Image (tube, coloured by chain):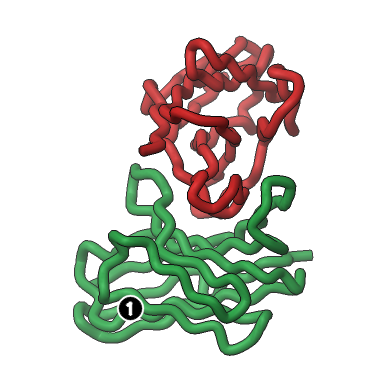
Chain colours: A red, B green
Amino acid sequence: AQSVTQLDSQVPVFEEAPVELRCNYSSSVSVYLFWYVQYPNQGLQLLLKYLSGSTLVKGINGFEAEFNKSQTSFHLRKPSVHISDTAEYFCAVSDLRYGGSQGNLIFGKGTKLSVKP
Amino acid sequence: DAMVIQNPRYQVTQFGKPVTLSCSQTLNHNVMYWYQQKSSQAPKLLFHYYDKDFNNEADTPDNFQSRRPNTSFCFLDIRSPGLGDAAMYLCATSIRQGLNTEAFFGQGTRLTVV
């Protein structure tokens, strides 16, 4: 069965510092990976996704992620964070029972990023 | 402009009293999804509709039902809410279920059970 593990439930960081949010997945076949951001009492906004091709994926708000098949990871990075990046971040994998549908997702438990001045 | 609209944003219901959450979309998408997100947990898919074809996840409790009267609207009915059903409920849509079709999420409805 597919699963997603986000190792850090909370990540505090100072403004303008770099950050990495870790995500590992479990799947025996091809995977399609996503990072979403959720601000308090809001829905989910897609940051970036990996479907195929280049393993380095760039998304919105200056975020990027690297797909590493050998380590089954898809870590999210930003070289310099802002206060406005404070939010919860979810890693997800497409449920392959539905052919890679971007709406049928299996999410990790999330990482709360807290950016301090 | 909002494309996936969930009403209300906040809903308070009494223990055991049926409640309905609403989702509408202006995208004319074929697929609509409902996710449940409990506090500090991952969003979890409850079910989805592909047109009128209803697909229930195996572990979705019988207490949860859904209706899709037309393309634009989809409802989540909780027949007898318990305290454990308090959560954020997220609706999403996609034009179809394919690899290159992006899903769009609504703002969510936060349900409180008292």
**Residue position marked by numbered label 1 in the rendering:** B78
Q: What amino acid is at disc 1? A: Ile
Decide: is A29 above or below B27: above
Name the residue furthest bottom: B69
Q: Quadrant of residue A27?
A: top left
- Quadrant of the drawing holding the N terminus of chain A: top left
Decide: is B50 above or below A10: below
Decide: is B46 above or below A75: below
Q: In the rendered structure, the residue with mark 1 lies on which chain?
A: B
Rendered location of residue A99, percent (x, y): 58, 49
Rendered location of residue B49, percent (x, y): 54, 72
Q: Residue at x 69, y 18 (%)?
A: A55
- Quadrant of the drawing holding the C terminus of chain A: top right
Q: As drawn, is B77 to the left or to the right of A78?
A: left
Name the residue furthest right: B1
Residue nearer the viewer, B63 or B98: B98
**Circle 1 SS class:** strand
Q: Residue at x 27, y 65 (%)?
A: B85
Q: Residue at x 72, y 63 (%)?
A: B95
Q: Residue at x 44, y 21 (%)?
A: A11
Q: Residues within 10 Å of mark 1 (few under 14, many from 20)?
A: many
Decide: is B106 above or below B63: above
